[in-house]
Amino acid sequence: MSNAAPTPSPSASSPSTADALELLGLVAQLEHTAFVRLAGDCAIAPDVEQRLALSRFAAAAVERRDRVLARVAELGADPAATMRQFDDVLTEFDERTQPSSWWERLLKAYVGYGVADDFCRIAAQGLDERSRAVVLEVLDDASHAELAVAELDAAGSRDGVLSSRLALWGRRLVGEALGTVQRLIAQRPALERLVTAAAAEPAEAGDATADGGNAPAAGTATPNAPAKVFGELTAQHTRRMSRLGLTA
Amino acid sequence: MSNAAPTPSPSASSPSTADALELLGLVAQLEHTAFVRLAGDCAIAPDVEQRLALSRFAAAAVERRDRVLARVAELGADPAATMRQFDDVLTEFDERTQPSSWWERLLKAYVGYGVADDFCRIAAQGLDERSRAVVLEVLDDASHAELAVAELDAAGSRDGVLSSRLALWGRRLVGEALGTVQRLIAQRPALERLVTAAAAEPAEAGDATADGGNAPAAGTATPNAPAKVFGELTAQHTRRMSRLGLTA
């Protein structure tokens, strides 16, 4: 698998179908990774109720991944090959952020992979309409996050020491996650084109950092697009941590 | 969880709803175990195509388990508790049959768990009509078995040494699997009542060892029911091994 896009994009700031396929491959790989992780959680969960819930989340991740791969096939590309190029996308992140408890594992899923999902959501604004709809729909399923929030919130409110340890862990996670996104954008011009196009789009609902009236006209390249992305990712992270009553 | 059925069955040979719930719990647990195993295979599979296929089989096992648990809920019982009593049903079998290669692992899934499925299929003949339909439908999905057969058949036909090692492994697996079934029947009067009732039922399609005309009238207890079960399990095993070109 080469990193080069199969067809050259028409201009530096206008994403091509090949660019779209890169983001779709990344989202498919993230959902696949979520499946493997949730199934692993399921295998070690001490309680049958948790095992039932986690296995269902895992099965739902397979279904979401396959919806993304169906879009890849619609665009005429090979699903397995499109996904395979992102095989190692989280390897380094995972090596640097080994959780040492169930709570750290839970917070990592919510906060660490939350950043990856947010990044894909932002980049999706640069996609064609149909691909964007698939990605946003797939990333919209927050049922597993809700469970993590409920468990973490309950545990943190009972235990102040746990709470401040988790706040620290959250800061480490977001630092590593932002670093991963930064490397990804640097290594993949396709993703940079997508976030640049996305920054030029009018803000979507749910984009709380949007400054509506000042957004440039759609299609105009924004030179500081990556900086805007990191601003948004950080804002989303702060919101996520405060939902847990943790200091970001 | 106690082994005793919550309500006494009306006679020694007529299965009650509590008996039905035991078999449903066993089938749900087997499907859940299949999910965990397939997800584990997926996490170590070297090839993306295999990973995609295995994750889909895993998700399908969750869906099958949940169909069985829906029937448990229909019968007014608690799904998690009904499944929990079979938590350790394969622990000893798994400890005694650790596969030492990918091929041994594949044959174990096909041959070892095949025996468990066959046992449930036989016992299901003693269930009420609706529960029986759910169990037979759930156990009818052979897509994963087809993949195992294709891979094992191709590998065995290329390699005579592998073939005879796998034949030996198959004999060990079936011995351990039959032992597991034997202990299960001995420990669980509910399951014995079900196989006894099943042995008294007219043979179903697909039961190749049935001797049609000689079957006792439905509802009549058959004293040698367990012996008949083991005869059927062994015959199915022999058929399975010969599909692979292996000596049973």
Image: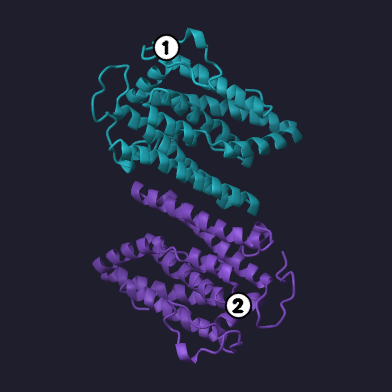
Chain colours: A purple, B cyan
Tag on residue A235?
none
Q: Do labels 2 and 1 share a chain?
A: no
Q: Name the residue under label 1.
A: B224
Give me the chain letter of mark 1: B
Residue B180 placement (x, y as % from top left): 45, 27
Crowding near the residue tagged with mark 1, few <14, some 14–19, many ≥20 C-alpha atoms within 10 Å: few
Horizontal arrangement in the rendering, residue B175 relative to residue B18 (left or right): right
| Residue kind at label 2, given as amino acid type | Leu
Q: Position of residue B222 (x, y in %)?
A: 39, 11
User: In this rendering, which labeled residue sits more in front, label 2 or label 1?
Assistant: 2
In the figure, residue B22 lies in which quadrant? top left
Residue B104 visible in the picture: no
Q: Is residue B187 above or below residue A170?
A: above
For the point 56% across and 52% down, the residue is B43
Q: Pinpoint residue A77: horizontal percent, then vertical percent.
A: 69, 61
Contact between marks 2 and 1 (CB within 8 A): the answer is no
Q: What residue type is labelled 1?
A: Asn
On the rendered image, what quadrant is the C terminus of chain A found in?
bottom left
Establish if B128 lies above or below A145: above
Circle 2 is placed at which residue position? A194
Nearer the observer, B158 or B140: B140
Near-viewer residue (B155 or B10): B10
Could you tell me which residue is drawn at 61 percent across and 23 percent down? B239
How many marks are shown on the rendered structure?
2
Name the chain letter of the residue that bears numbered label 2: A
Q: How crowded is mark 2: few (under 14 residues within 10 Å), some or many (20 or more)?
A: many
Task: Report helix, strand or loop for mark 2.
Answer: helix
